[in-house]
Amino acid sequence: MIQTNEIWETLRMIDQEKLDVRTITMGISLFDCVCDDENRLAGRVYDRIARQAERLVAVGEEIEKEFGVPIVNKRISVTPVSLITGAVKSPLPTAFALDRAANTTGVNFIGGYSALVQKGMTAADRRLILSIPEALSRTERLCGSVNVASTKAGIDMDAVKLCGDVILQLADQTKDRDGLGCAKLVIFSNAVEDNPFMAGAFHGPGEGDCAVSVGVSGPGVVKRALENVKGQPFDTVAETIKRTAFRITRVGQLVAMEASRRLNVPFGIVDLSLAPTPALGDSVAHILEEMGIERCGTHGTTAALALLNDAVKKGGVMASSHVGGLSGAFIPVSEDIGMIDAAACGALTLDKLEAMTCVCSVGLDMIAVPGDTPAATISAIIADEAAVGMINTKTTAVRVIPAPGKKVGDFVEFGGLLGRAPVMPVHPFGSETFIARGGRIPAPLNSLKN
């Protein structure tokens, strides 16, 4: 039951503190589209999505208008495409069908051009990964992901090596847009099946035929709340964040239930992540600085982020009957004005970001590196982050953009929610011999829980 005082509090957060629902995402299973003809498969995929999601955008706009809650994006996620293309020669016709379906339904993005290869690659997985540069450079709204590691399986280093090569190719094929294609590709460890956020959203094989999920946001709301407890102990800080996260998540719960009812689709989850934007007043970095950190990235940043992430989860989980996805604090550099400023002045480095990913929601996100960065270095960055996720039994990810023709200190410009980012330095020492070994890094001892 939504109380009257919650409604008034929500209106204040929307009007003054940039509260929004970041996305309504409809997950759609494509298993019933499978066939052995790639053009017929593509046609079935298009028809399935166009039919199932034809009212998604309209319903989202109705809810925005009636409830006064901004819904920034309407999105679709689908079954990982490598799982439905095993009997065809190329997944590319399906990629283009997905993009056409996204255009027809009017959604902002469609995710699921994905492969799950944490323990090895099938022929279909390999074909899909190799096709990613062409698929994502020739489409507008399609997003993809590759899960290369898990706590149960270890790290597939052959897939890690391949992903480094693919990322460089994708950057080159979108060099006229500062490597923008790489912003649509995420490399995961411990990917979750119900994530509503792009670019890593897919509708996992353990999900039903269809579901609607919501991802909430609200860094500005949390920062404003902390301004009222300046100088007080961390116990008070944590309690303040918990109470605020509860209120934010209640908004997501309301929107998700209403969208589920109107679309006649099961309610999936509310992802209670704090997702920033490049707009002033909507920054996770500024929350950490409000706790007393002079600049995000300096000593104490990881501890502050750990407190924030934990308090968000504790507060949000009490506000919704179904919490899932990633749920925590995101730290995408190009999408957070505080992170952008911290990286530009040198306070925030790649190494510090890696440390922060041990305690945040996902990982190394929307980071621009020099365009001449070797593929092996990119693969090694992926391997490091995959190891963080594997050992700590958490989801981690890498979304890195080798910016063609750019060097350290230059900026890449993506616009919109993707923002802008300073090109950050990578270590000059090579990782080629390490990456060339291939094989699989074994699962850790803590994977043996049966």
Image (cartoon, rainbow, N blue to C red):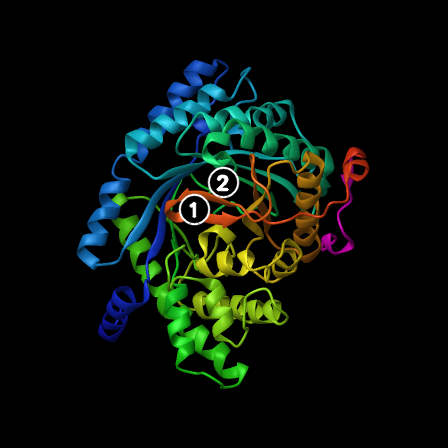
Q: Quadrant of residue 3?
A: bottom left
**First along the sequence among labels 1 and 2:** 2
Marks 1 and 2 sit apart, C-alpha to C-alpha, by 8 Å
Q: Which residue is mark 1?
A: 418
In the displayed structure, does residue 372 sit left or right of residue 420?
right
In the displayed structure, 133 sits above or below 359; it is above
Q: Determine the secondary structure under disc 1.
A: helix
Residue 284, horizontal then vertical, whole percent? 47, 63
Task: Name the residue that disc number 2 marks.
Answer: 183
Q: Is disc 2 placed on a helix, strand or loop?
A: helix
Residues drawn in magenta: 438-450
Q: Is residue 94 visible?
A: yes
| Mark 1 Cα-neighbour bin, 10 Å: few <14, some 14–19, many ≥20 | some
Q: Amino acid at mark 2?
A: Ala
Left or right of 340 on screen, residue 254? left
Q: Quadrant of the N terminus?
A: bottom left
